[in-house]
């Protein structure tokens, strides 16, 4: 028997050693090896034995492969600790696909976001590889935002961050006079040990939890977003001229006589792009003119260092946290109507078929003729509003040509496979006290799409130009989706009669686009669109031009928003150094040295901004739904998990129905089909299903909304 057992182990090892072997789950191995159902228990024992002998390993998705000898159990691995409120945690390791699981007993004093060294624990049949924290190399969290609760001779701060498992103990003398319900910022003085809470001192009182604006400020502070500009930065900004000097105009192409406009939202104040269009025979001559911010933000100046630290402007529901002081972002750098401004212009000659046959990238001086809104331009080109067309009659022919060109560009982009996920964003209207009074989808119109097409084309043109010059640059890249996620999507849509073609586990974006076209206006549209979106990776900034999957293009960068994005500001410097003949070997070496960090930090700060924006939206949506507890609404199932289903309402608000609240049956989660199925009735809740819900409970503190299903009559 023992020999048979060992032979079976050898069979599995031999199969995994084959170069064609792809990691498989136990069930897949059983099918591959033709193991009979009654013998599955022995297969489990064989796999467990191989795990214990460290001959094979198991991934977090439960897939088996040969043990990676490069990571011996006794070697120390460095990563970032991510805590969980239930006491355990995970460690993210650069270059390792799967996080390491840290049991509560093996955390050993690590705190959220600490840089730690861990030692791998012997493999087990768990879904993730486990490890133990050996050393805390660097503390990643020094301040925490939370709500103060006063006791007799001391107090506690309950962290807003749900990942933190312990309240923070505050000695009375370090409370700064805080009272019950104050939102505070705590500086940690002791990170605690097993059985003893962390300690801290209050360094800032934001206000009472019910005071207007304190809720948003708590999120701002929790994400470490800067709220004030340092004095040095403000002084430098104040010294900036309000008008363009004659010296700055010298050597630039004069485009002040060309008719051009800005097209933005009604409430936009930092206008960093203008557009112009004239005809050259049958060809379009499109100009995309971008504010030359680098003329006023010199490299390594106080302004530049602060902009790099911020990375991006952050657009929260009740405020904007700008990357640059208002003196620049709303003043000399903003392309305001009727005022001379410095710009970098990308002027493209485009055929009626939408092909760029010539282009120039130049330093320019411009003067915007009219500040237009998306609403007005949409009325002109889409609604043919007579009053609006009369008001802007001298611009109407240009807008109509722009609309024609944008349509051609969009058609071409679709042909090559560019993917558009058209899920509406939220527009949240607040009253003077910061209370949400209206929440609705923010709809894109013809004017927003027109500007989008022009900016995409300029970004592509600039990226391609500098790629072929072979000089250091910052690109915007979007990697191909994870093959496993695409396989899951392919398996799922096959149930509905749809297929996507893959080549060696890779997929062309056109296949996703074709799929979205096929499902349009079908009952499965919302469900499959959401799954396709979730299979995508996140775009990022890199110094290697590896292509943009979502846009189906090889060359792409962010050139068009230097007022609010640091990568755009950085590449403007590179462009100007090249245009002025300063791209010498030492300058190239300088950029090669600094750009990887610029790209990495910009990507990280962009994610921080996105998360802060999402959290403020969730907060205001929860606050809005507090007014509607007990009311019923129609919605669609937007997510399915083992703990329940998520339902999205037409106004973009999403809440959860816990599995225990699904009516009339015991429901089982089907991971393969993303659905909950009643074991007795066969009732299904799947992505995209229309349901009626009742608002049961709202927790503003953790920003969650609980629904229950209203049974069908």
Image (spheres, rainbow, N blue to C red):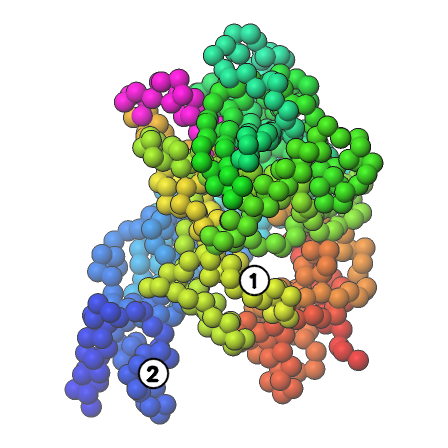
Residue 580 on the magenta span = yes
**Mark 1 secondary-structure assignment:** helix
Residue 31: assigned label: 2
Q: Residues within 10 Å of mark 2 (few under 14, many from 20)?
A: few
Percent position (x, y) of residue 651?
73, 55
Percent position (x, y) of residue 451?
61, 38
Residue 378 on the magenta span = no
**Residue drawn at the location 52% of the way across and 75% of the way down:** 497
Q: From the image, give the main secondary structure of the stretch colored magenta.
A: helix
Residue nearest the viewer, comparing 518 with 566: 518
Residue nearest the viewer, comparing 609 with 514: 514
Q: Is residue 393 above or below residue 82?
A: above
Q: Residues within 10 Å of mark 1 (few under 14, many from 20)?
A: few
- Quadrant of the rendered structure where residue 601 is? top left
Q: Quadrant of the N terminus?
A: bottom left
Res 154 visible: no
**Residue drawn at the location 45% of the way across and 56% of the way down:** 509
Residue 517: assigned label: 1
In this view, the mark in front (2 or 1): 1
- Left/right placement of residue 106 relative to residue 712 reads left
Real-space Cα separation, disc 2 to disc 1, in angstroms: 36 Å
Of the numbered discs 2 and 1, the one sitting upstream in the chain is 2
């Amino acid at each position: 028997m023992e020999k048979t057992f060992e032979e079976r182990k050898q069979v599995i090892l031999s199969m995994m050693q084959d170069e064609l072997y792809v990691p498989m789950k136990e069930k897949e191995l059983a099918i591959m090896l033709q193991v009979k159902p009654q013998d599955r228990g022995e297969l489990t024992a064989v796999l467990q034995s191989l795990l214990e002998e460290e001959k094979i390993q198991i991934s977090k998705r439960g897939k088996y492969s040969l043990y990676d000898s490069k990571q011996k159990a006794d070697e120390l691995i460095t990563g970032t600790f991510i805590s969980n409120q239930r006491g355990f945690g995970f460690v993210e390791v650069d270059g390792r696909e799967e996080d390491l699981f840290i049991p509560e007993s093996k955390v050993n004093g690590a705190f959220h976001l600490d840089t730690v060294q861990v030692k791998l624990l012997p493999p087990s049949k768990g879904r993730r590889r486990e490890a133990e924290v050996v050393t805390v190399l660097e503390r990643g969290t020094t301040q925490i935002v939370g709500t103060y609760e006063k006791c007799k001779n001391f107090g506690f701060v309950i962290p807003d961050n749900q990942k933190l498992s312990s309240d923070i103990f505050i000695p009375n003398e370090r409370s700064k006079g805080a009272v019950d319900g104050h939102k505070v910022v705590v500086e940690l003085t002791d990170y605690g040990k097993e059985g003893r809470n962390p300690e801290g001192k209050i360094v800032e009182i934001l206000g009472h939890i019910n005071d207007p604006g304190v809720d948003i400020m708590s999120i701002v502070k929790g994400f470490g977003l800067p709220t004030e500009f340092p004095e040095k930065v403000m002084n430098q900004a104040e010294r900036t001229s309000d008008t363009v000097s004659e010296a700055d105009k010298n050597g630039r192409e004069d485009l002040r006589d060309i008719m051009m406009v800005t097209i933005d939202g009604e409430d936009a104040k930092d206008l960093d792009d203008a557009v112009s269009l004239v005809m050259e025979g049958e060809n379009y001559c499109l100009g995309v003119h971008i504010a030359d911010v680098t003329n006023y933000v010199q490299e390594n100046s106080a302004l530049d260092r602060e902009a790099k630290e911020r990375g991006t402007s952050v657009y929260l529901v009740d405020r904007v946290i700008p990357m640059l002081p208002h003196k620049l972002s709303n003043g000399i750098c903003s392309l305001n109507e009727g005022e001379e401004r410095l710009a970098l212009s990308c002027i493209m000659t485009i055929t009626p078929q939408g092909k760029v046959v010539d282009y120039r990238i130049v330093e320019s001086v411009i003067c915007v003729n009219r500040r237009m809104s998306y609403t007005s331009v949409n009325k002109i080109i889409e609604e043919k509003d007579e009053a609006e067309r009369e008001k802007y009659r001298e611009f109407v022919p240009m807008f109509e040509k722009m609309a024609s060109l944008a349509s051609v560009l969009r058609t071409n982009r679709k042909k090559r496979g560019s993917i558009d996920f058209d899920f509406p964003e939220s527009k949240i209207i607040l009253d003077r006290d910061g209370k949400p009074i209206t929440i609705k989808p923010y709809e894109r119109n013809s004017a927003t799409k027109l500007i989008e097409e022009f900016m995409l084309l300029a970004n592509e043109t600039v990226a391609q130009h500098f790629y072929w010059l072979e000089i250091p640059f910052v690109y915007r890249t979007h990697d191909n989706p994870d093959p496993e996620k695409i396989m899951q999507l392919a398996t799922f849509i096959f149930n509905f009669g749809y297929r996507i073609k893959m080549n060696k586990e890779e997929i062309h974006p056109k296949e996703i686009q074709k799929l979205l076209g096929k499902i349009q206006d079908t009952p499965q549209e919302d469900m499959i669109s959401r799954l396709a979106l979730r299979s995508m990776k996140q775009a990022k900034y890199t110094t290697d031009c590896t292509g943009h999957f979502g846009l189906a293009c090889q060359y792409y960068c962010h050139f068009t928003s230097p007022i609010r994005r640091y990568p755009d500001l950085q590449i403007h410097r590179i462009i100007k150094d090249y245009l002025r003949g300063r791209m010498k070997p030492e300058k190239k070496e300088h950029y090669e040295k600094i750009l990887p960090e610029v790209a990495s930090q910009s990507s990280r700060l962009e994610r921080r901004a996105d998360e802060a924006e999402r959290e403020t939206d969730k907060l205001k949506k929860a606050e809005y739904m507090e007014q509607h507890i007990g009311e019923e609404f129609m919605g669609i199932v937007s997510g399915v998990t083992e703990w329940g289903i998520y339902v999205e309402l037409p106004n973009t608000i999403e809440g959860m129905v816990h599995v225990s609240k699904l009516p009339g049956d015991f429901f089982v989660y089907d991971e393969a089909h993303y659905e909950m199925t009643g074991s007795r009735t066969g009732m299904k809740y799947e992505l995209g299903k229309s349901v009626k819900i009742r608002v049961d409970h709202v927790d503003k503190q953790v920003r969650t909304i609980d629904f229950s299903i209203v049974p069908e009559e």
